[in-house]
Image (cartoon, rainbow, N blue to C red):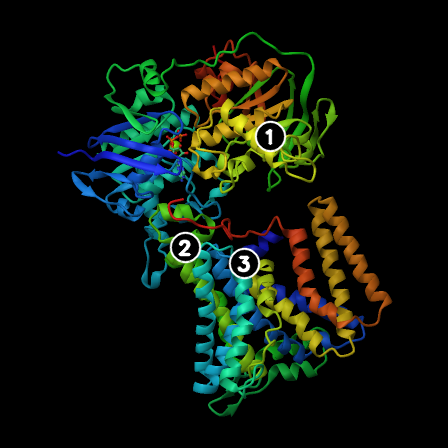
Amino acid sequence: MSAAIELTGITKRFPGVVANDDVNLTVEQGEIHAICGENGAGKSTLMKILYGMQGADEGTMKINGEVVDFTSPTDAIDCGIGMVHQHFMLADQLTVLENVILGAEPTLTGGRLDFKKAETHLREVADEYGLTVDVHQMIETLEVGERQRVEIIKVLYRGAEILILDEPTAVLVPQEVEALFENMRELKASGTTILFIDHKLDEVLKISDSITVLRHGKTVASLKNEGVTAHELAELMVGSELPTPATTSSTVTDEVALRLSGVTVLNEANRPVASNINLAIRKGEIVGIAGVEGNGQGDLVDAIIGTTQISSGTIELLGNDITYESVRKRREAGVAYVPEDRQHEGLLLSSPLWENAALGHQTQAPFGSNWWLNRDGARRQTEAIRQQFDVRTPNIDVAAHALSGGNQQKLIIGRELTSNPDVLIAAHPTRGIDVGAQAAVWDDIRAARRNGLATLLISADLDELIGLSDTIVVILRGEFVATLSPDEVTPRDLGAYMTGAALQNGGVA
Amino acid sequence: MTSRLSSMPAWARWMIYAASGVLLLTIVQSISDTDRLTQISTSREMLRWAVPIFLAGLGGLFSERAGVVNIGLEGMLILGMWFGAWGSIEYGAWWGLLIGIVGGMIGGLLHAVATVTFQVDHIISGVAINILAPAITRYLSEEVWDSPTTSPQTAEVGTWDVPFLAGGTIFGWESPDWLLTASKWEIWYLSDVAQLSRGLLRSTSWVSIIALLLVPFTVWLVWRTRFGLRLRICGEKPAAGEAQGINIIRYKYIAVIISGGLAGLGGAFISTELSGLFQGGNSAGRGFIGLAALIFGNWRPGGVLLGALLFGYVFGLDLKDLDGTASHAMLLVNAIALAGVAAWAFSRRRVADTVLASALGVGALCWWLVADTVPSWWSNTLPYVIVLLVLVFFSQRLRMPAANGQPYRKGG
Ligand SMILES: Nc1ncnc2c1ncn2[C@@H]1O[C@H](COP(=O)(O)OP(=O)(O)OP(=O)(O)O)[C@@H](O)[C@H]1O
Ligand SMILES: [Mg+2]
């Protein structure tokens, strides 16, 4: 039987970069094939070419042994290929059902949508693979994990035989990753071929049958997952050792930088999504929040940043009450913010990098003053961020959407850390960043912590949470239910706390 | 309360809106010195103004739901006015409407080529069309009718009287005119309702009837069909549509051309049904006001109609209001509406909005108390003021299509 996918000599150039340089990739029928490589190595580009979203400059593609030439995703879809993109491709204002059926809508006479048939089919697909979603919800009300499921259902709904998943686990908490892997195994059992991209090497080793490693747009290795170790894989990817996020000695001081007293946040239906939160983060301290997505951590972050009004309680920054201050005032007073969704809240995708680097700091030196932007200062600062944080880009005038996902993330981290903040609110700071760059970001956060930065860390990566935090609080249904010491807790225990299991059983033994 | 309203069928909700609107007018009228607020001619004028505004606004809905801002509606309306008049004179009334639609579609096509294919900024392209359209129609008038500003008399498609309610004829038999009878009873509120209703149902242009039918049709087309879903994805997240194999560019083109066609129908209505001839300047900015109705209506067909009727009422009232007393009474309506907004904001604990709405409401009330009449510029400005207020107080509830106005490139 011929290989499911066979790519030979694929080359793709963008102005100033060669994203794919003579890449070869062979994926056998019915296997789970992982693609690894540092940020900007060309993984997403290769997948977009395979899905017909971008045309290759050179090279040939064979699907199931036949040479194909895709000019649009329609061609790829016709060949049974489905893709879940690195950044969600969902319309917020449409329902789950509408998003899923898009492009493959069942219709009655006159072009009328057959919602009933669509829903039945959707439920069949969802049940078959144990993916649960509420089909009539608007996408905007869903948590990231649910959105991920919608994306996968979307592809399965069309009966794809070749599945491309671009960093599907980046936004998931460990339990959800487990569930996803379970789904992937089932799909594989039913004959589906899966190609997936992941930066977490332990996950790659756990699920994949074979692995292809890209570096600077070239294929550097293609191997079977037999006896490979994470160290060897990291070596292949970035040429360095696997880092661990272990904190060095404590730098916690007595001075409180951020204090939340009795903070309650209500949602639109006037229900508390965060209730009576008390929290003090001292200078030099990192407080980690552990919780399954959607338990109020997002609302808490919004409240601190000022994008949501709190209904009771106070927020103090360095002893000053900022409860009623505007977002801008808070930012100017020294609050830095790494949002959980970089494309939604972090960047202006069609603006150049230097404007993006000024975002949120546009009223402060070196980016500008109250009224004026300082182009030269902004550009110089952007260059500095680019070098210090290794943002891979041909220059700082390209639009943000031309950066690879991980490099977009690095730009945001750089922007926030170089603003010399007193408080850093970091939601999933290393989401989508490769192992090498991840170590660098951890080092940067630790260095800032030594200099007195107070950090609120939210992360789905429990190793990161345990490794970086001085204290971990567990949030469940909008309430802090436990305070743990990272020295004494394992990711397993933490997982039990997050789901509430540990609390019911009277604590972890 | 709101949840109970929104769980009702649409027609029932509309009945409640209408009934309470008329009640407000009746109350105001009984404490002020005008009787024009609820006259038959007032609602007739309202509808005549509202129809082209609504058609332009609905055109805007198609375009913006597909992600293309269409400020060129005014220009497309003007093209519709000219082509409608020309077609009507040359080939007869119904052909006039059709040719007017085509004229607007040409404007739409131009806008689509500029914005979708060449990625010109949507506002710039729209403004260009608004400048071009009067110039082109002037030139064409000169060529065809030897007069730069006016055309000969046009044919009109005619009107319809609703039987029983407004005395229409059925197979030559003249039915009773119940609403007229009821309006002569002079019962408080009831007669007012009858008068306003009769204005809508007596000698109603066929175009108005078509326009009203477009509301349910658009809801069906845009929210219930495959075409509509694909059109909406263009305005919400085109990249997602593209990834699902949808030809975004094609749908954007179709939407913008439909948009031009609807504005063109509005234009043809102005020249053939309202003025009976083409006259430069007769559009009176109704394309722009249509855009205002689109925003007021939250990018939904029913909302656009509501906005068009509201603005049409303000303009229609002003037209027959030579002494300015009716517009003066409208100040009191404004004050009451603002009080309602203030109460709403207060119930949501929105301090700044409550204060602002109360201040504006008190301002309107004071103006009403000290003056006997208001200048006519006030009525012309009012629709825009209303939209500004809607934006100030309700912007959080307005939902513009997420990717509206953004350039779209294939392969993102
Ligand atoms: N539309 C585009 N225009 C210009 N350059 C682009 C574009 N898309 C990608 N690139 C460049 O191509 C290179 C490869 O990007 P790609 O997104 O494939 O990386 P990746 O391997 O997926 O990285 P990550 O792990 O960060 O997601 C990067 O240098 C990026 O800047
Ligand atoms: Mg990528």
Mark 3 or 1: in front is 3
Q: Residue furthest right?
A: B370
User: Badge 2 sits on which subunit?
Assistant: B
Q: Are marks 1 and 2 in contact (CB under 8 Å)?
A: no
Q: In terms of image quadrants, where is residue A419?
A: top right
Q: Is residue A24 above or below residue B19?
A: above
Quadrant containing ligand 2 reads: top left
Residue toward you, B347 or A399? A399
Q: CA distance from mark 2 to mark 3?
A: 28 Å
Q: Give the x, y percent position of residue A99.
A: 40, 47
> CA gap, disc 3 to disc 1?
42 Å
Q: Mark 1 belongs to which amino acid? A: Leu
- Answer whether residue B206 is visible to the viewer in this image: no
Residue A33, placed above or below residue A89? above
Amino acid carrying label 3: it is Ile
The furthest residue to the front: A376
Identify the residue at image location x=32%, y=41%: A155
Q: Which residue is mark 1?
A: A300
Please indicate whether residue B225 sits to the left or right of residue B70 in the image. left
Q: Secondary structure at mark 1?
A: helix
Residue on which the image places disc 3: B124
> In the image, residue A330 lies at what x, y percent?
67, 31
Q: Which mark is residue B229?
A: 2
Task: Measuring from the top left, give residue A509's x and y in whole percent.
Answer: 47, 10
Asked if the residue at label 1 sits under 8 Å from ligand 1, the reply is no
On screen, residue B113 versus residue A257, left or right, reads left
Q: Which mark is residue A41?
A: none
Image x and y of residue B311, in percent: 64, 67
Few, some or many residues within 10 Å of mark 2 (<14, 14–19, 20+): many
User: Residue, x 66% and y 37% (percent of image)?
Assistant: A309
Residue A320 shows up from this direction: yes
Tell me how far mark 1 sits from mark 2, CA to CA: 35 Å
